[in-house]
Image (spheres, rainbow, N blue to C red):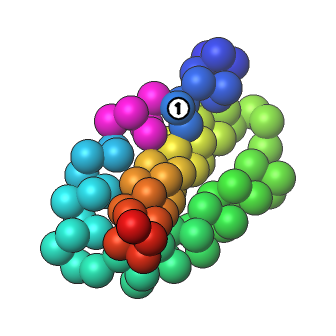
Amino acid sequence: VQLGILTMPALCMLVFSAPAGWFADRYGRRPILIVAMIMYALFGAAPLLLSMSNIWAIIATRVAVGLCEAVAMTVTTAMIADYFK
């Protein structure tokens, strides 16, 4: 279970990067990036407020962090490609 806490964000980045790109193309890159960064900060700090006995809640926040990282990496790469030649 502890290994899942460590590797969950990377696994979620692998799974959610393609859908994040699709959503960014469909709904606009900047608003999605702003929401993802706010959620990243909230979910990243959430384990500080959770009890260590509730390990599944911590894993759930790590999944959310991985989703936000996938959105951030995909959208920022697309925005760099848009702005620079």
Count of numbered marks: 1
Magenta-highlighted residues: 11-15
Q: For residue 6, which quarter of the picture? A: top right
Left or right of 22? Residue 11 is right
- Residue at left 44%, top 57%? 77
Q: Is residue 53 above or below residue 84?
A: above
In the rendered image, residue 5, in percent from the top left (x then y), is placed at 64, 28
Say which quadrant the C terminus sits in. bottom left
Residue 32 seen in render: no
Q: Which residue is mark 1?
A: 10
Q: Is residue 8 above or below residue 16?
A: above
In the rendered image, residue 81, in percent from the top left (x then y), is placed at 38, 64
- Of residue 82 and residue 44, the one placed in the foreground of this image is 82
**Is residue 12 found inside the magenta-colored segment of the image?**
yes
Q: Is residue 70 above or below residue 42?
A: above
Query: Dot 1: few (<14), some (14–19), or many (≥20) neighbours within 10 Å?
Result: some
Left or right of 34? Residue 50 is right
**Is residue 52 found inside the magenta-colored segment of the image?**
no
Q: Dominant secondary structure of the magenta stretch?
A: helix
- Residue at left 60%, top 74%? 38
Residue 52 seen in render: yes
Q: Is residue 83 above or below residue 17?
A: below
